[in-house]
Image (cartoon, grey):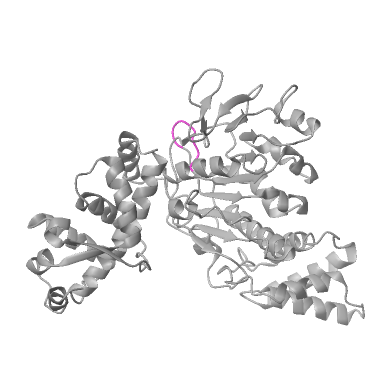
Amino acid sequence: MNSSDQQLANEYLTLDTIAGAGFRSTADTDELSQYVKDALGFGAFNIPARLAIARSLSISEAPPKPQSEPGRSIKGETLFGTGPDLAAWVSLIIEHHGSAPANLKELQALVTAHWARGMKRVAEDVRTADADSTEFWRRLAESGLPAGTDRKSTSEPGGGDQSGLAEGPIVLRLGEVGRDVATQEEVRWAINAPGGSPHSAFMGGVGSGKTRTAAFVLRALAGYGPVPLLAFDFKGDMSDQYNALDRAFGATVISPPNKPIPLDVFALADRSRNSVVSTAQRLRDSLSNLKQTKFGDMQKRRLNDALEASLLAHSPCTLDHIKDALIDAYAEQGVKEDGAVASLVDLCRLPLFEPRMSPAEFFSKSWIISLPASVPELVRVAVVSLLTDALERYVNSLVDAPTDDEGNRSLRSICVIDEAHKILGSRLPGLANLIRLGRSKGAAVMLISQKPDDFEGEDDDFLSEMGLIVCFSTNARDNAVKRILGQGASLTTLKKGEALLKQRGDVKPKKVLAWE
């Protein structure tokens, strides 16, 4: 801030003061602004800046403070205009903030924060539209339509949730190219169409483009509305500069145990005896599958007793409470501690969860849970198991998601597991129930794995529940390929960017060029 700006920052706020002041972006914002300006053909930087600030003001939460270095400065009268235009912008900023800024410096900080957050959203919208200005403006206009009257405002079990819903027909192109190799027609998937399934599976070998294509589909989904994302990232590339799911969904990236997940993961829908018993049984099944050597009947019984005791005695209940109750159960019965206790003790060595948010609060936001190879396998499986279990219990406590006049069901959440083969053999009950029962609640699941063989260790036939199956080149067993794609299908002869794609109801798969 130069000396004249510093002087203005200490002056009483007037429209003339604001018009003459400089408003500064960040270096990261400038980079995105250049991309948006070039893609949409703007002649000056103040136009994408206005678009970005307006985009941020449409989000009810306060924008975070930017961490990037300072960027270019635009004079207030250039950024916002003068007279009624300037007054309107300032009024919107004050209304969003909830109170008038104390001075110019505080107003400048608010503008910088909105500018940074909004530009991320606008740039992602441009990418989702493949830099097609017509498609971008169409999506932007649709995102500004008023919410339907079917939306719920309550966050109590049995009611709606606090997040928005993606409503109306949601039709997604399957890849950057997304073209049928035989007919050259564009291939799209209506994820929430009546009679279909919103779940999907993307498979392929290393470097085949499965994650790239899945991320493209997800970014397109984010353009339809504020669908909360819960993604498990085992490679660390879902939030990189190419896939950019954190920017598309406004997601927080968190990596336990470096930072605990701020969820009351054992929260009860109510504290009735029936709720405690049923929740304890569900959690018992989740926790008893954490290791390759599954718990025996007596281990499960003691774990169930420990869960019931902990859920009744503590609110919020934590893994430490359950571990202590299990140790007490073994001591009371005079039984030597075994692998069941050891598993809980190992999990409690690391801070995985911190019960700061209710399920309604947590699952109304978007999260990318980073679980790289450096994280112990027990921790990775436990985090996925407990989070999918908590999501399923929360989602299925809500009323059914509304449908429009054509039967398209609104989406309430999307759960994504990249490198799903790392946990598919663990038989996660929460994930299984999300796939089997979540459709009517507006929940969608996307599994990204290496080959069809990965799904054969599951008690539930997940692939039969998928509305979309996309298979890139991979070395899979013929029987597994035949089972899901039909006689004669081959995944080893696919060329770069090609995939076999089968939607629910298709007699045989299509060969699609997803990317090139």
Q: Residue at x 52, y 34 (%)?
A: 515
Q: Which one is nearer the viewer's eye here, 426 or 284? A: 426
Nearest the eye: 259 or 171: 259
Provide residue 394's location: percent of width, then percent of height. 59, 57
In-image side of 3 versus 455 (left or right)? left
Q: Residue at x 66, y 39 (%)?
A: 204
350 with respect to 332 (left or right): left
Determine which quarter of the picture holds residue 320: bottom right
- Tell whether 50 sits left or right of 117: left
Identify which residue is drawn at 64% across, 40% down. Answer: 201
Residue sitting nearer the eye, 406 or 474: 474
The reply to whether residue 477 is in sight is: yes
- Is residue 277 something one can see in this rendering? no
Q: Quadrant of the N terminus?
A: bottom left
When the figure is inspected, residue 454 is found, relative to residue 513, above or below; the finding is below
Residue 170 magenta: no
- Residue 251, position in %: x, y? 47, 58
Q: Position of residue 440 (x, y in %)?
A: 57, 43
Residue numbers of the magenta segment: 404-410
- Image vertical order of residue 312 relative to residue 197, above or below: below
Residue 407: within the magenta? yes
Whole-percent x and y of residue 116? 33, 60
Query: Residue furthest toward the top?
Result: 183
Picture layout, residue 82 above or below residue 352: above
> In terms of image quadrants, where is residue 310?
bottom right
Residue lying at 82% horizontally and 73% vertically, measured from the top left: 342
Q: What is the chief secondary structure element of the magenta stretch?
A: loop
Residue 166 position by quadrant: top left
Count of picture labels: 0
